């Protein structure tokens, strides 16, 4: 059943009980209005087409611009740049070393005989001239007595010859004797004087040998080796220079001052002087420093190791260090004019030498040849070829070349 609103253009008439639709004709536009509509329709269609065109092209243009920017960014790689820092004026050089006695000596017998007694054992602190042992040499004592008797005989003969020569000279003045006889007596007196001098020298020699019956310490120190016992036969002399010298009676070491020998690398040798600050450390005393001083150096580079031998003296009057112990030598290397420094990761090793890559104001890479100075481990001093204002690329690739356009990302100073 149709409702009264079934068609908006129809009017309904009521006839009895039924509704009868009445259809009316639509109003027709005038002829002038039709012409205006015909003129506006192309313009509207053109506007709609332009709007649709704009809506479709603008996103495409934006996407193309973004893609172009992304491609350009991929073509210009991003690099981390750093500014060179100032190298420290002083740095520490750590080297291994072993402390040794300032002086040590093997004590031998200078005369042969039997040990009568000894008075210094291992660990005994002795002073210079202190008696360590006494050797019994009866044969040598007898030789000294004989030499003294011979010297007395020679002295008597010389005195007699002297008086005889004087008398003959007096008689020569009165022409009582011939000149030849007087000269003979003078020559005899001079010969007797030479014999006396020889006898006296022999006495001195044997007396000196007898004095060696007392074995004494050559300097203040501590006895580290004792190879004698009462009644042991010892012979004069020894074999110095061997690890276990033959006939060694005692070994003495001076331990109140210890000496450390270390080898300085060639690159650091020029910084070492007698005034260089130095201290020692050892694992026996964690955190403790033993002040020392550079006492002497060889001032030459060993061609086999390219190092310079340096001796460091340390005061050990408290006995904290033991001779032969392993220590670490800490040397302070000072320079008056420190240069710039860079991390090792910024260096390029090219056939022409060590090179660094820097970024200019035009974002292009330039390669600079540099000279390395001091080595700090992870950092090195750049002696020449670098300016403080340069922006250096950190971790540059091996394929980087001069003129490459890059995007610099600043990471700060070194």
Image: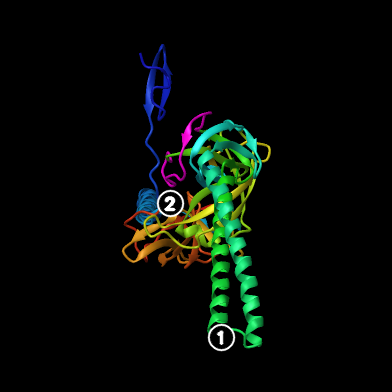
Q: Is residue 393 visible?
A: yes
Instruction: Residue 42: say if magenta.
Output: no
Against 198, residue 80 (above or below) is above
Residue toward you, 296 or 401: 296
Residue shown at the point (48%, 49%) measured from the top left: 377
Residue toward you, 377 or 74: 377
Look at the numbered discs 1 and 2 and tell me whether their residues touch, using CB distance below 8 Å.
no
Residue shown at the point (67%, 81%) measured from the top left: 170
Instruction: Residue 229: say if magenta.
Output: yes
x and y percent of residue 373 in the render?
Answer: 48, 61
Q: Secondary structure of the magenta portion, mostly? A: loop
The answer to whether residue 266 is left or right of residue 173 is left
Q: Which stretch appears magenta?
A: 227-245
Circle 1: is it few (<14), some (14-19), or many (20+) Cα within 10 Å? some
Quadrant hosting residue 155: bottom right
**Circle number at residue 345:** 2
**Circle number at residue 327:** none
Q: Which residue is mark 1?
A: 179
Dot 1 falls on a residue whose secondary structure is helix
Residue shown at the point (63%, 58%) measured from the top left: 275
- Could you give the CA–CA distance between mark 1 and mark 2, rounded to whole angstroms? 104 Å
x and y percent of residue 317 in the render?
Answer: 68, 40
């Amino acid at each position: 059943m149709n409702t009264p609103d079934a068609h908006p253009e129809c009017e309904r008439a009521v006839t009895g009980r039924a509704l009868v639709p009445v259809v009316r004709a639509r109003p027709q536009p005038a002829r002038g209005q039709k012409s205006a509509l015909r003129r506006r329709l192309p313009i509207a269609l053109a506007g709609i087409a332009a709007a649709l065109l704009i809506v479709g092209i603008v996103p495409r243009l934006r996407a193309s611009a973004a893609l172009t920017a992304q491609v350009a960014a991929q073509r210009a790689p991003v690099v981390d740049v750093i500014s060179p820092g100032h190298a420290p004026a002083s740095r520490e050089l750590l080297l291994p070393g072993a402390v040794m006695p300032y002086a040590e000596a093997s004590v031998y017998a200078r005369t042969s005989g039997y040990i009568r007694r000894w008075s210094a054992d291992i660990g005994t602190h002795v002073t210079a001239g202190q008696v360590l042992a006494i050797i019994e040499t009866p044969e040598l004592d007898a030789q000294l007595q004989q030499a003294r008797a011979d010297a007395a005989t020679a002295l008597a003969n010389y005195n007699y010859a002297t008086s005889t020569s004087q008398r003959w000279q007096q008689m020569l003045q009165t022409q009582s004797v011939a000149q030849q006889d007087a000269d003979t007596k003078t020559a005899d007196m001079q010969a007797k004087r030479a014999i006396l001098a020889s006898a006296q020298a022999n006495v001195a020699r044997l007396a000196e040998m007898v004095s060696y019956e007392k074995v004494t310490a050559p300097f203040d120190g501590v006895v580290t080796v004792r190879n004698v016992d009462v009644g042991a036969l010892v012979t004069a002399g020894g074999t110095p220079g061997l690890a276990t010298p033959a006939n060694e009676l005692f070994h003495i070491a001076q331990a109140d001052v210890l000496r450390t020998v270390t080898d300085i690398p060639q690159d650091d040798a020029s910084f070492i002087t007698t005034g260089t600050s130095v201290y020692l450390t050892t694992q026996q005393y964690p955190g403790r420093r033993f002040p020392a001083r550079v006492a002497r150096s060889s001032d030459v580079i060993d061609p086999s190791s390219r190092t310079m031998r340096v001796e460091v003296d340390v005061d050990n009057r408290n006995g904290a260090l033991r001779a032969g112990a392993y220590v670490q030598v800490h040397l302070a290397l000072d320079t008056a004019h420190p240069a710039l420094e860079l991390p090792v990761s910024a260096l390029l090793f090219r056939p022409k030498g060590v090179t660094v890559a820097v970024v200019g104001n035009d974002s292009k890479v330039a390669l600079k040849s540099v000279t390395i100075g001091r080595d700090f481990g992870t950092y090195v001093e750049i002696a020449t070829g670098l300016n403080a204002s340069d922006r250096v690329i950190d971790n540059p690739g091996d394929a980087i070349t001069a003129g490459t356009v890059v995007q610099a990302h600043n990471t700060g100073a070194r």
